[in-house]
Amino acid sequence: MTIASLLFESQVLLALAALVVAGVGELALEETAAKITNRSNAMALLWDKFWAPLLRSSILLGFVILLYPLLFGVQVAPDFRLLIAENALRLSNLMGLLLLLSLFLPLAPFFARRQHYILPLQGILATAFVFSWLTNYLGVTASGPWPGIDPAIAIGVLIFVGHRAANRLAAWAGPMLDEALGVSGSTRITLNIGELLAQAPVILLYGFALGRQIAP
C-alpha cells in the first residue's frame, strides 16, 4: 500500500466525512454554549479555556482512532479495544495530555504567535501514542516515534501549507456559500472545517511513515 492509495480507502473517506460533521457540530455546540453563558463570564471562560479545547482534542483523537489500523499502512491488526484493554487509563491519559497541550502551549511565546501549530502537534502526538500501543501489543521493540528526516520535512511543509490553504478556502468559499444559500457566517464554518481537514494529511503521512517500521 502507498500513501496515495491510502487516500482513496473507504475507511479514510469515512473518517474525513466524520471530521467535516464534527467541524460543523463543534460550531453548533459553541453557539449553544454562547447562548447559555452569555450572562455568566465564569461559564464563558470555562467554555473557552476547558470545554472547547477538550472538544477539539476529542475530535482529533477520534479521527486517529477511526483511521486505525489503516493509518499505519496495514489492513490487518489487533482490534483497537485490545490495545487499550492492557491499560484502562490509556485513552483518558492521552486525552488529558492533549488537553494540557491545548491549554498551555498558547502560553509559550512561540506558540502564542503560531497557534496553528498546536492542532497538528496534537494529531501527531495522538498518532504516536496509538502506534506505541500497537507495537507494544505486537512485541515490536525496534520502533519509535521518529518518522525519518524526509517525512518530517514533508510534515512541516504540510502544516505550513495546510494552515494557509484553510484560510484561503474559507475566504473564497464562505462568501460564495452565503450568497448562494442566502445565509451569513459560512466563512466561519468553512474555516473551522478547513482547519480540521488540514490535519488529515499531516496525521496520515506521519502514521504511514511510522507504519513502515513494522511493515512486513
Image: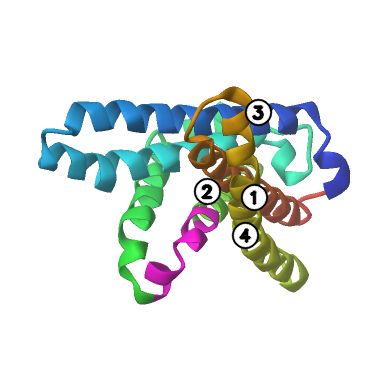
Residue linked to disc 1: 203
> Type of residue at label 1?
Ile
- What is the count of numbered marks? 4
Q: Which callout, 3 or 1, points at the residue further toward the start of the chain?
A: 3
Tag 4: residue type?
Answer: Arg
Density class for disc 3 (Cα within 10 Å; few <14, some 14-19, many ≥20) is few
Q: Looking at the image, what colour scheme do you see?
A: rainbow
**Residue 69's x, y, as percent?**
69, 36
Q: Is residue 144 above or below residue 33?
A: below
Tell whether 101 sits left or right of 173.
left
The residue pinned by badge 4 equals 164
Q: Percent from the top left, x then y, of residue 155?
A: 68, 63
Residue 31 x, y percent position in the rendering: 34, 30
Amino acid at dot 2: Ala
Circle 2 is placed at which residue position? 126
Q: Residue 140 versus residue 107: which sits nearer the camera?
A: 107
Between label 3 and label 1, give the one nearer the viewer: 3
Residue 4 vertical placement versus 152 (above, below): above
Residue located 42% across and 46% down the image: 94
Q: Earlier in the sequence, mark 1 or mark 4?
A: 4
Distance CA(mark 3)–CA(mark 2): 19 Å
Q: Residue 17's mark?
A: 3
Q: How many neighbours does mark 4 have within 10 angstroms: few (below 14), some (14-19), or many (20 or more)?
A: some
* Residue 64 visible in image: no
Image quadrant occupied by the N terminus: top right
**Is the Cβ of the residue at disc 1 closer than 8 Å to that at disc 2?**
yes
